[in-house]
Image (tube, grey):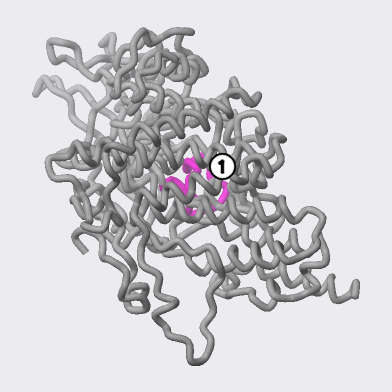
Amino acid sequence: MKKNKLIVLLTLIIFASCNDYLNREPYDILGNDVVWSDEDLASGVLANLYSRMPVDEFNASGYHGDLSNAEFNMLITDEAMWSGDRNGLNGVRVLDPYYYSLWNYGHIRDLNLFIEKATQSNLLLKDELIAEARFLRALTYFEMVKRYGGVPILTKSYSYEPGQSIQELQIPRSTESDTYDFIAIELTEIANVLPANKGFRRATKWSALALKSRAMLYAASLAKYNNKMPNPIILPGKEVGIDASKSNEYYIASYEASKQIIEGGFYLNPDYFNVFNTKDVNEMIFAKDYLEPDIIHGFTYRNATPSMAETENNGSNITPYLELVEAYQNLDGTSGKIETTNPDGTPIYYAKIEDAFKNRDYRFYATVLYGGSNFKSRNVDILAGQKIWNSSTWSYDYKMGMSLGETDQLYRPVIGLDGPLNDKNVTNTGFYIKKFISTEPGAGLVTKQATNYWPIFRYSEILLNAAEAAFELNKPEALGYLNQVRQRAGFGENSLKQLTFEDIVHERRVELAFEGHRFFDLKRWRIAESTFIGQDFHGLYPYIIINEGSVNHLKYVLEKVKPARLFENKTFERKNYYTFIPTDAISNNPKLVLNPGQ
């Protein structure tokens, strides 16, 4: 018997690390009686279900080619452009309405089957195991409802029997509000069954409350802001569209869930970068973790700067826009706009490139690498070229290099070791991503890779959720929650004296940058169209001045540029607010109502 148990466990481990397994249904394992008489085997099956949870993390892919869904999320909004190979990624002008598809009923069926088998078992810890599976099911339904609106709610495993009417298996979509209500009820019921300790690898009371905090905030803002549109997006059966009258109910539910977490002993890590670089149980509530040697990810080698790259012909995929850089305020609360000229139009000369980025929101320094910034004991070397004074034309001529690290005949720099260039695997915007780049030795090697985790729920988001819900409910404590987040970023204890909706939008943009929130935040607030339509995106290129005898000789100027490889402006269409139902799902179930525009 022990030998058979070992075989099953080894099979689980091997399958769990194989991509092919994600498309297989392990009913033979779930239905094996041995599993339901052994805590370790049941936990092993649950671990497999955890590995399949719908999280847009470092390794998940499917929305666009072979890049990770996490990277695609960074590129599809106003955060960054693609500076890697395959320039077609910069031509995603209109989002394909089938992108973000997650019709995840194979996973739902396995979770339902796990719950059924565990319920029938005599396992000592079955209540906790069932609660974990219900958490994963609620998370999966949330990831579907935020994409499609209302979806069919299945709470048992269906199987076809010969002679059975197929119509019995064709379940219609629930309303959008009923789907959110189901998630809320599930999370309320399991929260006190799950352990109350801190731990980000498995579901706890706190991760259940965090999911409720986020899901109810989404439902509330959809109920409010969709109905403020001149022409709200609604289907006749309310598969899409939540009554405005429900917004306060949902805001209250979100606020109360957030409040429980706030009183639960979590706190903000003083070092924002280390929230993502180390394993932190005090701020991270739930995360997709990685562990050597098998559970690793390649985000670091895919996005390292050229001068720090450990793997050739890779890196520099995600390069932030100037617009994101300028979203980070100065510590005195003024705009973070980078000044390149004086009021009279003359250039501003900087003794060092990094002087242009002084005294800013601390989160900026932990999120973005810029010319002169220090990382891994090296300075990032960004220089676009020389501007050489021409006394005959009384103007500057540009000298542009062709290769990284190029110098002139006097060994003065022309192109930095880290670009920028309008080429692949080097920044096209003048910036690199720092957030999520691991400092582990060898993390940039394709043969080793990295093990820093992907955040799913963390404490600062809960503070922002509480601030937003409290703001919408006219609760005065909203300001204090937001200021807590800002205080960690270097602002004063009460840096904001009053709170506006724009402050909430701004703080979520900079606090949660690159974590996959931005696109769905813009959609739930119904401001995606106004954010994208007509918006240009830019880079910032530094040049060194060559003008011997001038006080500006060997100083730097900065120029705002439109990257040449960014050949399409983004836009957003009304149909992009909801992902289209997959065609194979519609073929299998004609009861499914199509989404608006489909």
Q: Is residue 298 magenta?
A: no
Residue 319, image x, y percentages? 38, 41
Q: Quadrant of the C terminus?
A: bottom left
Q: Is residue 323 visible?
A: yes
Q: In the rendered view, does 360 fall on the left or right side of 264?
A: left
Q: Is residue 385 visible?
A: no
Q: Which residues are magenta?
A: 302-317
Q: Quadrant of the N terminus?
A: bottom right
Q: In the rendered view, does 228 fall on the left or right side of 69?
A: left
Dominant SS type (magenta): loop
Near-viewer residue (374 or 73): 73
Q: How many marks?
A: 1
**Residue found 44% across the figure and 76% down from its top:** 169
Q: Is residue 167 above or below residue 497?
A: below
Residue 163, image x, y percentages? 48, 92
Q: Is residue 303 magenta?
A: yes
Q: Is residue 324 above or below residue 492?
A: below
Query: Crowding near pointer 1: few (<14 within 10 Å), some, many (20+)?
Result: some
According to the picture, the residue beneath numbered tag 1 turns out to be 188
In the image as oriented, which residue stretches furthest toward the bottom? 163
